[in-house]
Amino acid sequence: MDAHYFVIGTDGRQYGPLSADEVLTWLSDGRVSRYSRTRRDDGTQWVALKDLAEFEEATRSPFADFTPPSADTADAIARYQEVATAPPLEKLDPVSCFKRSWFLIISDFLVLGGWTLLVAMAISTITLIPRAGVIIGAVLNNLLMCGIYLLFIRRMRGHRATFEDVTSPLRRMAPRIIIGGMVQSLVTAPLIMATLATASSPTTTSMLLLGVLFVPSVYLIVGYVFMLPLIADREMPIWTAMETSRRAVHRQWFPIFGLLLAAGMLLFVSAAALGVGLVLTLPLCTGALMYAYEDLFDQR
């Protein structure tokens, strides 16, 4: 007789008995994740879905053997260089990231959606402060965003994040996060300046400069998108996080670019509609990005 399973879905409810094929369908649809608590119908022990041998292949991430470095040692750096350049086991699916994010958000909107919106409002308020807003934002904005990243990551891994779970890594990694955010800003600065120069004075020189900067700048902006989550979650040094993110994303660059483009379009449309839709799309897009992070860097 084929085995059947009971699972805790991403909405926090128990379902079952389900066949193996039904579990795989739910996994594809985002109704369960690799971290969902699961037990066989003939057993009593609940384990993560990824820990069941029959679902090992389906729940394996593209970098299943990734062991992130947490210190500036030669062995750790050699390890991340070896793994980050390895070919992925599967292609990242942006649609699946949004699906899983949707189920996650609706299962715990008060916490995930509420905190995301509060942080977004705080960042917007800081930005509006005359003169000092730039300095305050450089210190606080990325710390606030990393707090949201950690909140989502903990929830995706099947845990209810406490205040200490989120703030403890931020306190330890605050200098790295602040400096890392400044480095990210420096990467985007040339493209922004060239775009503004072209918009204000569309000369041949400015358009040529924009054309030269566009491709490498976009490549690096996408490539470094997981730098801050790696610092906050895996406590990596800045350069290690930058290179780990870039090397991993390089193998999945177009899917990650597609995810960011779709998220940007959703946020733009929501903002254009009097900002009402941002209540849902902000946490949805944040969750999709963090699911992509988990798919790339999941440490089994």
Image (cartoon, rainbow, N blue to C red):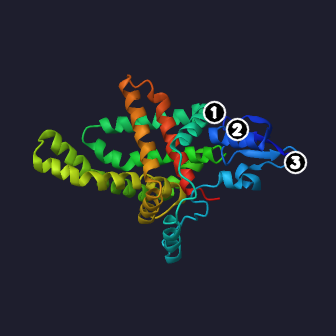
Eyeballing the image, is 262 above or below 80? above
Eyeballing the image, is 246 above or below 47? below
Task: Assign a secondary structure to mark 3.
Answer: loop
Estimate the spatial distance between the alpha carbons at disc 2 and disc 3, rounded to whole Å: 18 Å
Give left or right: position of 29 versus 195: right
Query: Residue type at mark 3?
Result: Gly
- Which residue: 29% across, 45% down? 134
Nearest to N terminus: mark 2 or mark 1: 2
> Are discs 2 and 1 less than 8 Å apart at CB?
yes
**Residue closest to the eye, 284 or 238:** 284
Give left or right: position of 135 versus 51: left
> Are discs 1 and 3 less than 8 Å apart at CB?
no
What x and y, as percent, mark residue 64? 61, 60
**Residue closest to the eye, 170 or 281:** 281
- Which residue: 39% across, 51% down? 222
Residue at image mark 3: 43
Say which quarter of the image contains residue 199: top left
- Which residue: 70% across, 45% down? 36
Nearest to N terminus: mark 2 or mark 3: 2
Q: Which mark is residue 107?
A: 1
Give left or right: position of 227 versus 191: right
**The C terminus lies in quadrant:** bottom right
How many numbered callouts? Answer: 3
Task: Assign a secondary structure to mark 2.
Answer: loop
Q: Label 3 neighbourhood size at 10 Å, few (<14), some (14-19), many (20+)? A: few
Residue at image mark 2: 9
**Residue closest to the eye, 286 or 97:** 97
Q: Is residue 16 visible?
A: yes
Of tags 2 and 1, which is closer to the observer? 2
